[in-house]
Amino acid sequence: MTRRGALRLPGISVLAALGLLAVAGVLAVVPHAIAPADPIRVDVTRRLLPPLWISGGSIANPLGTDQLGRDVLSRIIHGTRVSVFVAALAVSAAGAIGITLGVSSGFFGGWIDRISMRVADIQLAFPAILLAIALAAVLGPGFWKVIIVLTATGWVNFARVVRGAALTVRAQEFVEAARGIGARPGRIVRRHILPNLLGPMTVIATLEVARVIIVEASLGFLGLGVQPPTPSWGNMLSDARAYVATAWWLPTFPGLAIALTCLSVNLVGDWIRDTLDPRLRNLRSFDL
Amino acid sequence: MQRFIARRLLDAIFVVFGVSFVAFILVHLSGDPVLLMLPLDASQQQIDEFRRRMGFDRPLLVQYLRFLSGAVQGDFGVSLRFDQPALRLVVERLPATAGLALVSLVLAAGFGIPAGVVAAVGRGHGWDVIIRTLALVGQAVPIFWLGIMLILLFGERLHLLPTSGTGTWRHILLPAVSLAAYSAASISRLQRSAMLDVLGREYVTTARAKGLSALTVIIRHALRNALIPVVTIIGLQMGTLLGGAIITETIFAWPGVGRLSLQAIQSRDYVLVQASVFIVATTFVLINLVVDILYAALDPRIAYD
């Protein structure tokens, strides 16, 4: 068995994942330029058409049409927008709050630490999806409400991990040294703590992106997410439930889009973690 | 050890208080809970009367203390939709959820642990690649979509298994598999990395060097130690399973607490929402408390402070 080198180049699967995420990013920004049809245009003469490769399908609707004759491919392309923007905004907001609280708790301790970790304990007592569903039901549906819900349920994961890492870094000698030569706390945090937290922060961020995409889709599926007619992967699957027996393509393709996106995010996340985490590099192999 | 248990118990009690506050305040987050619960065309007189009857005209703190003293006595009020005590509705459905979660947990551990061991032992080879790929897919597929796909395949296409309700052992298969998939993937990944960590230790090399067979070393020396981190996250998986049960139960019409809480949320039955949210979270806190104590009892290396 080979030992891992100091730098791991991305393998073919990671490259494919990065490519897929790049495509998702482009689709999210300019869906109009790429989608073959208008995602909300109803055409009852073309209801429930199967995909291209099934008899009865046509090139005009490569992945078929839904119960209102809307083009499934175009709806998935436009649905990318909701998933990508919700994930980007919610993870950024949750990250900003969680990292600030985590670093303050880990580095300074004191009442910020006690209060934020108590709140985190209480929040973690709820299955996250239950809290998200209840919160979404009370706040009402909609794009920004979904982001608030996902931020409120996501900060705690950042805070926990970052606090733990900050505690470890704080105890190290170079921080002691910096303090010894009279560096102020603000400088120590900026120059010594934060750069050392980059690894855990990146790893938790990728995990959160995948989680947020799935929870957003779950909320959409339950009718608590972005509302129709705006297509999202979740609300497409919600509509598709009634057609499981008659139009298999309706529940299949939006779900594939979610699974492929999350798979790509996880692959990239694992690659980043393996590259950054020195412990994994020192693993010895065991030959039998 | 006793001090450790006492401290964890105090922590848990504090968290349950916090949970009760969150369950209570959820309903008030939108502003006026009365408007959430009544239909849009309710008259002002109906609104006022409902507000008085539910006690929503009292100060928030008074309302919370009433909720809390009710909760301690097992009285969460009467469900608006079912017209029955909320606690009874939830408790009646607990066994169905517990059964589903337990079967899922057994499936997840039963597949995840051996898969992780096989992957670690054959690191870099065929089985490792297959297991790791499956685990990655398992963590990327949303529960509700997996549920729908299982219904599509085993129910609609092959007509092999029932896709909704309860009755025979065959009814639990599809919901349990869709609920277990994510946990099985997580467990196998953790088991693999814990196993790799242990396989590199010197006592394993020693055991091999003194002539013990590979299988003996893997099971007796490596797996025993590599199971410790896995056992801890199995407690955490219960939270994932309880959360996932909300969606799984809804898709498969499984008569448990998850489906009940979603029905309560969707029909704006906030008495029932408070009761089910509080009971689900409290159950989770208790499970974690028990796992923590068991863990400390099983592994003498855990520091009690």
Image (cartoon, rainbow, N blue to C red):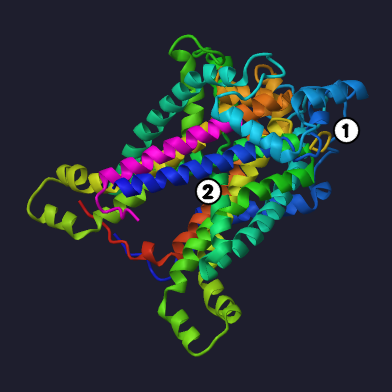
What kind of residue is marked 2?
A: Asp
Packing grade of label 2 (10 A; few <14, some 14-19, many >=20) is many
Residue B83 x, y percent position in the rendering: 69, 13
| Marked residue nearer the N-terminal end (2 or 1) | 1
Q: Is residue B267 visible?
A: yes
Q: Nearer the viewer, residue B234 or B217?
A: B234
Name the amino acid, label 1. Answer: Arg
Q: Is residue B158 magenta?
A: no
For the magenta stretch, what is the residue range? B276-305
The residue that appears at 66% across and 49% down in the rendered structure is A152
The x and y percentages for residue B286 are 44, 36
Q: Which quarter of the image is occupied by the N terminus of chain A? A: bottom left
Which residue occupies 67% across, 58% down? Answer: A92
> Label 2's element?
helix
Give yes or no for residue B290 being in the magenta stretch.
yes
| Residue A146, quarter of picture | top right
Residue B123 appears in view = no
Q: Tell us which disc is closer to us: 2 or 1.
A: 2
Seen at 74% across and 54% down, the residue is: A26
Vertical side of A7 occupied by B68: above or below: above
Q: Under tag 1, what secondary structure?
A: loop
* Residue A112 percent across, percent down from the top left: 58, 62
Tag 2 residue: A121
Q: Quadrant of residue B99?
A: top left
Q: Are marks 2 and 1 on the same chain?
A: yes
- The chain letter for the residue carrying disc 2 is A
Most foreground residue, B216 or A256: B216
Image height of A277 relative to A183, above or below: above
Reading the image, the residue beneath label 1 is A41
Between marks 2 and 1, how big is the CA–CA gap?
47 Å
